[in-house]
Image: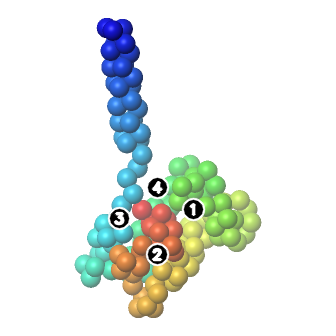
């Protein structure tokens, strides 16, 4: 009986440890409203095109681990899918320049801006295009 309880405790301990490691290592995705608050420089509770592109430019710089001013598919993984990467790579060199990256941001911004006001609300960032845009800016 003692041996069985000891094994159960070991399993429970390692289960809790594994769960903790997963939670610790997984980056927390910000809610749409948090993304708006974080990058809304004029405090109007929306993101305009300039705010979105400034945030995306900073994100590009963070993703550019080798500092060669381009993103290869490995560096962009998690921020942009393979299909979108290929479509954004307009010169077909296998990398995204900051201009190519920001062109994708521009396209997604336009798609997410359903009311065509030139700004994105938290609700608009919850759309399919808005969620994809969020990955590129944060």
The residue tagged 2 is 127
Q: CA distance from mark 2 to mark 1?
A: 16 Å
Please tell me which of labels 4 and 2 falls first in the chain.
4
User: Is 40 positioned to the left or the right of 131 in the image?
Assistant: left
- Residue 31 badge: 3
The residue tagged 1 is 80
Q: Residues within 10 Å of mark 4 (few under 14, many from 20)?
A: few
Residue name at image x 52 percent, y 82 percent: 111
Please tell me which of labels 1 and 4 falls first in the chain.
4
Please tell me which of labels 2 and 1 falls first in the chain.
1
Q: Position of residue 53 (x, y in %)?
A: 45, 74
Q: CA distance from mark 3 to mark 1?
A: 18 Å
Q: Position of residue 50 (x, y in %)?
A: 41, 79
Residue name at image x 73 percent, y 62 percent: 93
Q: Residues within 10 Å of mark 3 (few under 14, many from 20)?
A: some
Closest to the observer, 66 or 80: 80
The residue tagged 4 is 62
SS at mark 1 in the image:
loop
Query: Tags 4 and 2 in contact by the CB under 8 Å rule?
Result: no
């Amino acid at each position: 009986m003692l041996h069985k309880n000891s094994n159960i405790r070991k399993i429970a301990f390692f289960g809790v440890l594994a769960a903790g490691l997963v939670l610790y290592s997984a980056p927390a995705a910000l809610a749409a409203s948090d993304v708006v608050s974080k990058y809304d420089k004029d405090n109007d509770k929306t993101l305009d095109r300039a705010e979105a592109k400034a945030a995306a430019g900073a994100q590009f710089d963070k993703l550019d681990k080798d500092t060669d001013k381009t993103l290869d598919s490995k560096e962009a993984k998690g921020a942009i899918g393979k299909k979108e990467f290929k479509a954004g790579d307009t010169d077909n060199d296998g990398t995204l320049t900051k201009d190519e990256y920001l062109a994708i941001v521009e396209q997604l911004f336009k798609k997410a801006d359903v009311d065509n006001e030139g700004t994105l609300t938290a609700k608009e960032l919850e759309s399919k295009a808005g969620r994809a845009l969020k990955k590129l800016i944060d």
